[in-house]
Image (cartoon, grey):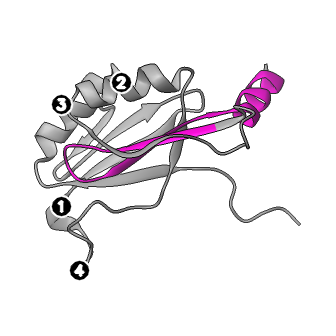
Amino acid sequence: METPLRGLSTVSFYASDLEEAAKWYSHFLNSEPYFRVPGYVEFRIGDYQHELGIIDSKYAPEGAAGNPAGAMVYWHVDNLHETLDRLLLLGAALYQPVTDRSGGKGDFVTASVIDPFGNILGIMTNKHYVEILNNKK
């Protein structure tokens, strides 16, 4: 039996100022949204063209947290420290510092920030991500 979860489709963030969020993420990602409708923008990013959607906060479900919130989704990056420094330079706030989750081996190293719109953005160097990517070539 196959797993019912086949892959990451879309990660969605909320922002009270959708246009500013679209500009900020365009600058960080070096890419413009590929899809826009009123109240929503979406970027395709990375090796598998995963989707990062930003939704106007007025469409957030009732009772959604007003503080930094969200599932901890980690995006693989090639250079964790450079990416973290760039995010902080662009106005994100440190949420979790660089942490080696592999007992000092450097196989799984994470950090996370709170973007200027209150969303948690996780970044990670992940040995398995690179192995899978290299095996697909």
Give SS at disc 2. helix
The three-letter code of the residue at mark 4 reads Glu
Per the model, the C-alpha gap separating discs 4 and 3 is 26 Å
The mark that comes first in sequence, 1 or 2, is 1
Give SS at disc 3. helix
At a point 54% along the width and 27% down the height, the residue shown is: 77
Per the model, the C-alpha gap separating discs 2 and 3 is 19 Å
The mark that comes first in sequence, 4 or 3, is 3
The mark that comes first in sequence, 2 or 3, is 3
Q: Give x and y (percent) for residue 84.
A: 40, 29
Q: Which residue is mark 2?
A: 85
Mark 4 vs 2: CB contact within 8 A: no
Q: Nearer the viewer, mark 1 or mark 2?
A: 2
Q: Which residue is mark 3?
A: 23
Give SS at disc 4. loop
Q: Which residue is mark 4?
A: 62
Per the model, the C-alpha gap separating discs 4 and 1 is 11 Å
Give SS at disc 1. helix
Q: Is residue 88 magenta?
A: no
Left or right: where 48 falls relative to 105: left
Mark 1 vs 2: CB contact within 8 A: no
At a point 30% along the width and 52% down the height, the residue shown is: 119
> Residue lying furthest bottom in this view?
63
Q: Give x and y (percent) for residue 131.
A: 79, 28
